Image (cartoon, helix red, strand yellow):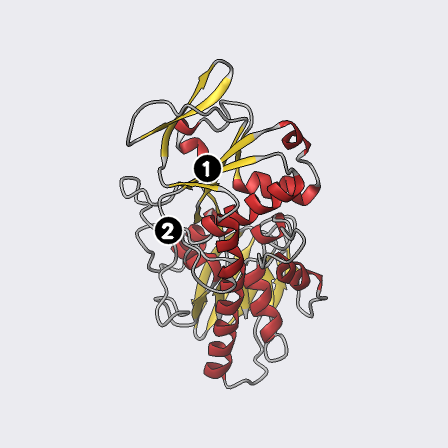
Amino acid sequence: MVIFGSGISGLAVAQNLQSDFRVVVLEENATAGGLALQLGCKATSECLYCGVCRALALKRDTPGFPILLQRKVRSIAKQGETFVVETDQEIVRGESLVIATGAIPFDARKVPNLGWKRFPNIYTGFEVEAALNQGFLQEFRLFKRVAFIQCVGSRNFKEQRGYCSQVCCRYALRLAENLAFLYPQLMIDFYYMDLQILGKKTEKLWEITRKIQLIRQIPFEVREKDGRMVLLFESTRVAESQPYDALILSVGMVPSPGTRQIGEMLQLNFTPEGFVRHYGEVKTSREGVWVCGTACGPKDIETSLEEAYRVSQAIRREKGGRKVEEGTLALRG
């Protein structure tokens, strides 16, 4: 069993199947854990059910399988019933492949009118997550009013990103609650198209919406006026009268370069947005190749872990739960 990607989905599949299969995980980055481990626990006086603790617990568990870091996949071929994966350092063989190469945050520079990297104190949601995780967000002590802007990079049919990233509203609301808890002086405005907070543990998220100012409009431009930032709206095309000390852009998720690369090597089908297309929830268009997590579409931590479990169960059913001689290694040179 060869798993591409050591994010939470890849690690979950590997841990679920290591008792039945010889598992090898290939990771192109220098560390395992993926995007989820860049996020921080957003608990205040109580748990906000963001799922980060589950991701951390998954990473802490001592794996009984090799995780090969900083591996660049050069080719994937099929020899009989076996896939042969050549990296820059070794050859790995397995009867089954799992694509768990994940997604990455949308690059907010592709929406230049929102001012990211042009104005100070404009952050993406993932930047705020990382700063909270590392304890670096002290500048917010000086701010009085901040705004969240939703759907940055998502819900844009013109750019072929018409999908909802499904996680932005939830992580933004949790961040808003966390910031309000840490910095009680803050007034928080929340600009949105619609709120996507269905699923588990939504009661707390609805409670958060009553503590902030919800504004059902999506600003189309950020401008500077008298040394402060103001927002312009599509409905009025005039500057919002209230200036802001900081803006937080809730960026969506897009396929990672690794998702595209591995999918093209295997000649898989893709969605119009560039994610690996799945069939029957977990299979791809090629026999013996499975997909889970954000490699096949945006989703939160809890959903990614549930999907990894379904992939594990499907593979175990198909292989009969026997110890399969998969994931064997042969060093190059």
At numbered mark 1, what does the secondary structure look like: helix, strand or loop?
Answer: loop
Q: Choose the circle earlier in sequence order: 1 or 2.
A: 1
Q: Is residue 289 visible?
A: yes
Residue at (42, 29) in percent of width and height: 114
The amino acid marked with disc number 2 is: Cys
Q: Nearer the viewer, residue 186 or 312?
A: 186
Q: Position of residue 269 (x, y in %)?
A: 33, 59
Q: Quadrant of the C terminus?
A: bottom right
Name of the residue lying farthest toward the front: 210
Residue at (35, 61) in percent of width and height: 277
In this rendering, would 197 be left or right of 156? right
The amino acid marked with disc number 1 is: Asp
Residue at (55, 35) in percent of width and height: 187
Q: Position of residue 36 (x, y in %)?
A: 58, 53
Q: Nearer the viewer, residue 302 or 44?
A: 44
Q: Which mark is residue 164?
A: 2
Q: Which residue is mark 1?
A: 107
In this rendering, would 257 be left or right of 157? right
Q: Quadrant of the N terminus?
A: bottom right
Task: For marks 1 and 2, give the one nearer the viewer.
Answer: 2
Q: Position of residue 270 (x, y in %)?
A: 34, 56
Is residue 122 positioned above or below 213 on the image? Answer: above
